[in-house]
Amino acid sequence: MTAYAMTEKVHIKACHLTLAYDDFIVQQDLNFKIMRGDIFIIMGGSGCGKSTLLRHLIGLNHPATGQILFDDIDLCTATPELRNKILFSMGVLFQSGALFSSMTLAENVCLALSASSAVKLTLQEMRELASFKLALVGLKGFEDYYPNEISGGMRKRAGIARAIALDPQILFFDEPSAGLDPISAKLLDDLILELRDNLGTTIVVVTHELASIFAIGNHSIFLDEESKTIIASGNPTDLRNHCDNRKVQRFLTRDLADKKHHGSGTCFDNDLSNS
Amino acid sequence: MQQALLKLEHPSTQICCYRLEGDWTIQSDFPKNKVIESALETGTQAQTICFNVDALTSWDSRLLIFLQKIIELARDHSVELDLDGLPSGVLDLLKISQTVEERFDARRNHQHEPFLQRLGVWVLDIIASCRQAMTFVGEFVICLMNWLRGKSKFKAQDFFTHLHDCGPKAFGIVALISVLVGLIFAFVGAVQLRMFGAEIYVANLVGLGMFREMGAMMTAVIMSGRTGASYAAQLGAMQANGEIDALQTMGISPMDYLVLPRTLALILVIPLLCIYADLLGIFGGFLVGIFMLDLMPIEYINQTIGALSLNHFFVGIFKAFVFGFLIAFAGCFRGLHSGTSASAVGSATTSAVVTAIILVVIADAILTVIYNALEI
Ligand SMILES: Nc1ncnc2c1ncn2[C@@H]1O[C@H](COP(=O)(O)OP(=O)(O)OP(=O)(O)O)[C@@H](O)[C@H]1O
Ligand SMILES: [Mg+2]
């Protein structure tokens, strides 16, 4: 593993987090730490609150209780300047892509560049950078297309290009490989690993794609809809091999039949098998 | 952040070595364009280009786009590239960016089109949109027939929601505008009529003006901005979201399901709003008559009743009915034919309001001529 992945510095820390929409509690008592250079996977069944957690992490929603700290700074209470600084250091891919429909792909990527005052690039360079980022996700030549003129998977990839435009320190990807063919998905995994290894980016990924979970993830949490909290956390491969929790097992092995695994699992012991 | 520096080294005449120093990041100060261009120029003269990164402190995509430019230049001038000196991560990222071949057929060329061509395209666009409008009206008529024969259905719930949206919710603004229009009418008339000592005819002026013309007209203008725009925005957003496509694949015609309830709601409500506007306009005139011209209330009311006949009333109501159809048509037509981007929905809304107002004014002129010919 590279030097970056091993630095034991906490980048994002969540303490006793409760996520809720008004009265409807989605997840509660979430505690986890994301280290610098981690590729951190958020897993869980559909509708369990993964995207909601992501929205809270990027500061779009405020936690009902608890705190999220970026290098010990709480986004909700930070001064506007500090808040902007943190926001400029993160890139986000939304589950729906959320590309600006009236801008071309190149303009979509350039927008973040021109919004940040720290960036010292000429217009020409911005355009080159946008082309390069699009090339990284396999969209070379599509700079002048509008989002509604490209396919769903391409839109997803363009969203990724926009997220990585500023070479951010933290990347949040909501289901980056959904809708991609296996080859593109593999290329995307490579890209994620390269970004982490070379730029030291902390990457938080929501995904169901088992192959990429095991290929890239070095830490993960498993959210459960029923108990509304984290039921397992740790390295995904370890979880698959050692976790006793039936739900986690089924998820990671895609197997509905029960297999008994024994060993020192990193998962919590609140097994829900009797529910 | 240290400044990024680019230096040239010539170990031999054949080899050109770029020495990269400092922070090559998007946040750092960068050598001037001229410096870079002349350095690249020198590179193209050599046989081999190589790199020295001993003094490079950090890098990001800035370095990558620079290298990509060099790679392209080297290819064009068939200069050999020696990339061994570069950090391995740089090479990996460059490799990823080149894994997927560029689709050259995808690239768009921006040619300046000559004036005649643009004019032609513009005319063709207009013809096409007229044809679309005709088709739309035709489809609507068929859909209306089907509905009258009980063949097509829409959700009654939807219909009542629209009814509520364009009816009761518009009471406030219609009242405000009509009272003011009645006031203005009476005021302007009073100044003229007073010269002849014929103040009492203000009642005729306001009554006829509101019933025949302004009641329907002002209601139509308000409803274009209120309801026509909202129809266009709703349908445009549905179009942008792919909801219209989804409806069609379910075998539900957008005409039946979306356009019909909206249009029916509007043409039902507009005549009623028009009556409401007529009465409030007359009330506005009444205020001027009583307080400014010192007329007796009963006198004013009698004069108004004497001036109006059922004919005048129906003239206005029929106009309102036609306007209602035109506004609903403009809103739904523009909405359904909107593009799929946020700004396209915006321009669909704008053009819905503009189209509605133009159509209303044109229809008003035509109807006035017809009424005149029929001596109503
Ligand atoms: N804006 C909202 N208002 C109210 N409830 C919401 C909202 N968005 C999501 N929810 C609810 O929160 C829960 C979690 O939704 P979320 O989108 O986070 O799921 P998810 O884990 O991302 O699922 P998926 O894998 O399908 O994307 C769901 O029960 C959903 O109904
Ligand atoms: Mg989600």
Image (tube, grey):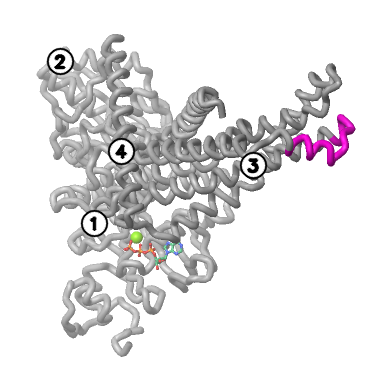
Q: Position of residue B96 (x, y in %)?
A: 18, 41
| Mark closer to the observer (3, 4) | 4
Residue in the picture at 41% in, 75% down: A228
> How busy is the neighbourhood of tag 3: few (under 14 within 10 Å), some, or many (20 plus)?
many
* C-alpha span from label 2 to label 3: 79 Å
- Mark 2, ligand 2, within 8 Å: the answer is no
Q: Chain of mark 4?
A: B
Q: Quadrant of ligand 1?
A: bottom left
In terms of secondary structure, where does tag 3 sit? Answer: helix
Magenta part of the chain: B290-305
| Mark closer to the observer (2, 4) | 4
In terms of secondary structure, where does tag 1 sit? Answer: loop
Residue in the picture at 16% in, 34% down: B84
Q: Chain of mark 3?
A: B
* C-alpha span from label 1 to label 4: 68 Å
Q: Nearer the viewer, residue B295 or A230?
A: B295
Q: Which residue is mark 4?
A: B138
Q: Chain of mark 1?
A: A
Residue in the picture at 19% in, 19% down: B16
Examine the rendered structure and indicate whether residue A136 appears above or below residue A144: below
Q: Which amino acid type is marked by label 3? A: Val
Residue in the picture at 50% in, 30% down: B360
In which quadrant of the rendered image does the N terminus of chain B lie?
A: top left
Number of the label disc, if any, that sits on residue B174: 3
> How busy is the neighbourhood of tag 1: few (under 14 within 10 Å), some, or many (20 plus)?
few
> How busy is the neighbourhood of tag 4: few (under 14 within 10 Å), some, or many (20 plus)?
few
- Mark 1, ligand 1, within 8 Å: the answer is no
- Mark 3, ligand 1, within 8 Å: the answer is no
Task: Say whether residue B51 is visible.
Answer: yes
Q: Which amino acid type is marked by label 1? A: Met
In terms of secondary structure, where does tag 2 sit? Answer: loop
- B164 sits left or right of B100 in the view: right
